[in-house]
Amino acid sequence: MRQLKISLKDNSYDIFIENGIISKANEYIKEVYKNKKVYIITDSNVEKQYLNQVIEVLKNDFIVDYVVIPAGEESKCLNVYASVIDSLLEKNIRRNELLIALGGGVIGDLVGFISATLYRGLPYVSIPTSLLSQMDSSIGGKTGIDFYDRKNIIGCFKQPSLVLIDPLTHKTLDKREFNNGMGELIKHAIIGNDRLFNLLLEKSIIDENIIYESLSVKKRVVELDPFDQGERMLLNFGHTFGHAIELKMNLKHGEAVAVGMLMAIKFGVDLGLTDSDIHSKVKQVLDLYDLPSFEVDYKEYLKETLYDKKNLAGIVNFILVDKIGHAFIHKIKEDELKWML
């Protein structure tokens, strides 16, 4: 078992990483939640895999209810957000009762947002069941739903009370979905852990230790910048271009991030800020884990970056790398970017 603590001024919490931890989730939840009623929110795919198991684990210590939503990115929307709240209110949820996000990134983002807004705030525990959600949405406090054809454009920051990561859940993922999570894991290595990058080049098994090494990168930047105004933007490496192509190319999030990282590297090389050798190294590791590594001309998508969430008061913050294990923020004014176009 590996453990990380996210230490924040207003809300610190633990992340436990252990094979089989789902089978004893009640022991960990009792330590952070003293009331009796809990509400599991999951989707129709995860329901078949884990819902009954988690209910059985929790029912000796808690009164358990649940809400199931349709699986898929389409559920991360205002209509489903409202329908889940309708269901919770019909079940007579009270202020300070606990939500449990059981599922992948869509569930994590949606439940986090519900937790932040229903009754102006409810506690929640995250049990991410996909590699992508374990790497990305389950920690750090970012919540969000999609709107106006833009990902996560509505949201807020809401930290969980606890995160339980069970690597055994990877066995129920299909190959593409597992690789989807590898996009974010590889990103952590590129921006902040050259040791992890070298381990990945050896085609390591994604176990407790690899997950710990990856999330250690995210822990550092979240603690430095919990509200995404400075260093935390480094976690968006590959996302500025990745978000622009994700829906247009019908890619999964981690796949789009993989291609977006290569686009950002090319952009950095053309700006004279990135070592050209990095491109071939990153392409090598993406190929090892069967992630897309085809070339997309970043110039065709520069206009889209004007509307990215990292555009702050007319300045677009591009995340670039100068070497494996080190990323930095490169600011470009809107006028300069338009001139490039």
Image: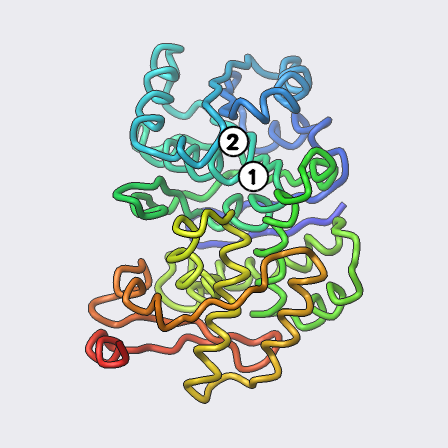
Relative to the observer, which residue lies in front, 162 or 323?
323
In-front residue for pair 72/26 = 72
Q: How many numbered circles does the render carry?
A: 2
The residue shown at (49%, 24%) is 41
| Residue pointed to by mark 2 | 101
Q: Say whether residue 119 is left or right of residue 18.
A: left
Image x and y of residue 97, in percent: 44, 23
At label 1, counting other C-alpha atoms closer than 10 Å, the crowd grade (few under 14, some 14-19, many 20 or more) is: many
Q: Amino acid at mark 1?
A: Leu
Residue at the image position 75 percent from the left and 67 percent from the top: 201
Badge 2 marks a residue whose secondary structure is: strand
- The residue where tag 1 is placed is 162
Asked whether the beta carbons under mark 1 and mark 2 sit within 8 Å of each other, the answer is no
**Residue type indicated by callout 2:** Ala
* Front of the two marks 1 and 2: 2
Type of colouring: rainbow
The quarter of the picture where the N terminus appears is top right
Rendered-image quadrant of the C terminus: bottom left
x 37%, y 37%: residue: 113
Crowd around label 2: few <14 · some 14–19 · many ≥20 (10 Å): many
How far across and how far down the image is residue 31, in percent?
61, 32
Q: Is residue 31 left or right of residue 328?
A: right
Residue 245 place in picture, x, y as percent: 41, 56
- Examine the rendered structure and indicate whether residue 80 appears above or below residue 340: above
Image position of 196 with respect to 128: above or below: below
Q: Nearer the viewer, residue 216 or 145?
A: 145
Q: In the rendered view, would you say 340 is above or below 55?
A: below
Secondary element under disc 1, as helix, strand or loop, is: strand
